[in-house]
């Protein structure tokens, strides 16, 4: 079996409203479908990322640079194909992240193809620790009242989603603690996991203050609590001074970055993002590092890929999704989306990633570059 060609299909979907985090906002959701075609007729397919402003640049890296390198080669030799793509990151005068995201898209599609060739779902091929995972939402955005936040929690419970990772870091610790507690009270009497994600918004002192204010309200973890400039040691300070679990890793682009966080004891949970950082091949290396340090593995967003990765390891945590208003792609692109019930997500059991994409949705929202 040999690679014949690689196709990319960028999608962009406008959102019904603008969602505000600590220092960013989103009014559209984007992704990039990647398809690897072979001379056997087998096709590997994935969708990756949310790069509204750069997905066409990522697509060009795939079609103009990666595809010629891999043409005619064996798609089942995924590690070899990854190493052949890696030199494209060596140019220090361009944005290395764009290349890593391009590599991730191709790597994901190659793994899907391997799973299809073996007639196995990827989570089983990668080890098979579980066939289902707890599921949480990313939500609790700014510019909502306490009543809005409470209604959001109620909506998640009705959808069968068992928790929420809410946004903090743009207001005072006191204001954010009030918002956090409002969501906690809305779930009173229900098993509901609640995390806080500052997206690197707080100073160290404010992060510590927030953690102490919500100490009695079951904070599962505190994600990227401090600003990026000295994030590793500052996260360690927040963790050591408050006793909260700290999560990070999505902003790291290589295993060496994560190794630094692990070595200094900065994190309890690693949420390395396969779609931002080289693909499942690199994520699995990072998961091995985390296991050696006794650190849990999460995954930033990307449930279509994260579910297989997290279910393949013993230290995986939660599948993360958004509310349908925030991510119409996950809720509408996947024609055979798995059911969500009782806070649990069944990992797709079909071969590879196990996804069937809705071609009508693809055609409606595809972006021509």
Image (spheres, helix red, strand yellow):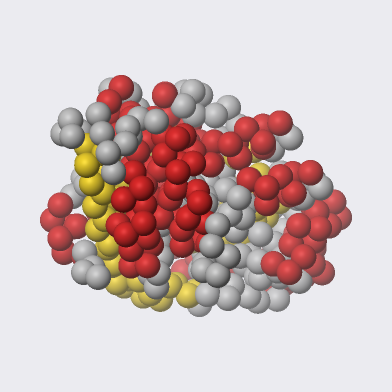
Image point (47%, 55%), residue name: 88
Q: Is residue 27 above or below residue 87?
A: below
Quadrant where the N terminus lies? top left
Is residue 134 in view from this perspective? no
The residue at the point 61 percent across, 40 percent down is 286
Q: How many marks?
A: 0
Position above or below: 205 against 329: below
Q: Position of residue 363 (x, y in %)?
A: 15, 60
Measured from the top left, where is residue 18 in percent x and y? 40, 76
The residue at the point 50 percent across, 48 percent down is 86
In the rendered image, residue 202, in percent from the top left (x then y), is placed at 71, 70
Residue at 63% across / 75% down in the picture?
A: 170
> Is residue 172 visible to us here?
yes
Q: Position of residue 201 (x, y in %)?
A: 66, 70
- Frontmost residue, 136 versus 101: 101
Location of residue 329 (image quadrant): bottom left
- Residue 50 against residue 248 in the figure, above or below: below
Q: Is residue 364 left or right of residue 77?
A: left
Quadrant (top left, top right, bottom left, bottom right) of the C terminus: bottom left
The residue closer to the viewer here, 42 or 330, is 42
């Amino acid at each position: 079996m040999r690679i014949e060609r690689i196709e990319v299909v960028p999608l962009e979907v406008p959102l019904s409203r603008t969602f505000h985090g600590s220092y960013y906002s989103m009014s559209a959701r984007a992704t990039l479908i990647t398809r690897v075609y072979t001379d056997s007729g087998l096709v590997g397919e994935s969708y990756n990322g949310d790069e509204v402003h750069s997905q066409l640049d990522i697509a060009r890296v795939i079609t103009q640079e990666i595809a010629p390198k891999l043409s005619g080669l064996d798609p089942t030799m995924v590690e070899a194909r990854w190493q052949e793509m890696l030199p494209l990151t060596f140019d220090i005068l361009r944005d290395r992240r764009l290349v890593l995201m391009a590599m991730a898209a191709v790597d994901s599609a190659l793994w899907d193809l391997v799973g299809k060739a073996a007639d196995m779902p990827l989570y089983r091929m990668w080890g098979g620790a579980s066939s289902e995972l707890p599921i949480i939402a990313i939500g609790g955005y700014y510019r909502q009242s306490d009543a809005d936040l409470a209604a959001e929690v109620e909506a998640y419970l009705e959808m069968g989603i068992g928790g929420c990772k809410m946004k903090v870091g743009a207001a005072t610790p006191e204001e954010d603690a009030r918002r956090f507690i409002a969501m906690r009270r809305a779930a009173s009497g229900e098993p509901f996991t609640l995390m806080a994600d500052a997206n690197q918004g707080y100073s160290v002192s404010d992060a510590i203050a927030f953690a102490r204010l919500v100490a009695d309200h079951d904070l599962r973890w505190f994600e990227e609590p401090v600003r990026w400039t000295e994030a590793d040691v500052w996260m360690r300070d927040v963790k050591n001074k408050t006793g909260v679990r700290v999560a990070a890793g999505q902003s790291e682009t290589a295993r060496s970055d994560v190794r630094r966080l692990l070595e200094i004891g900065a994190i309890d949970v690693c949420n390395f993002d396969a779609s931002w950082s080289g693909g499942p091949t690199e994520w699995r290396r990072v998961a091995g590092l985390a296991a050696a340090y006794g650190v849990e593995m999460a995954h930033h967003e990307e449930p279509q890929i994260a579910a297989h990765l997290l279910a393949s390891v013993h230290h995986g945590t939660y599948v993360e999704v958004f509310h349908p208003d925030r991510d119409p792609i996950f809720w509408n692109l996947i024609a055979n989306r798995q059911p969500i019930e009782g806070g649990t997500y069944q990992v797709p059991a079909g071969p590879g990633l196990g996804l069937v994409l809705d071609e009508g949705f693809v055609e409606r929202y595809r972006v021509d570059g």
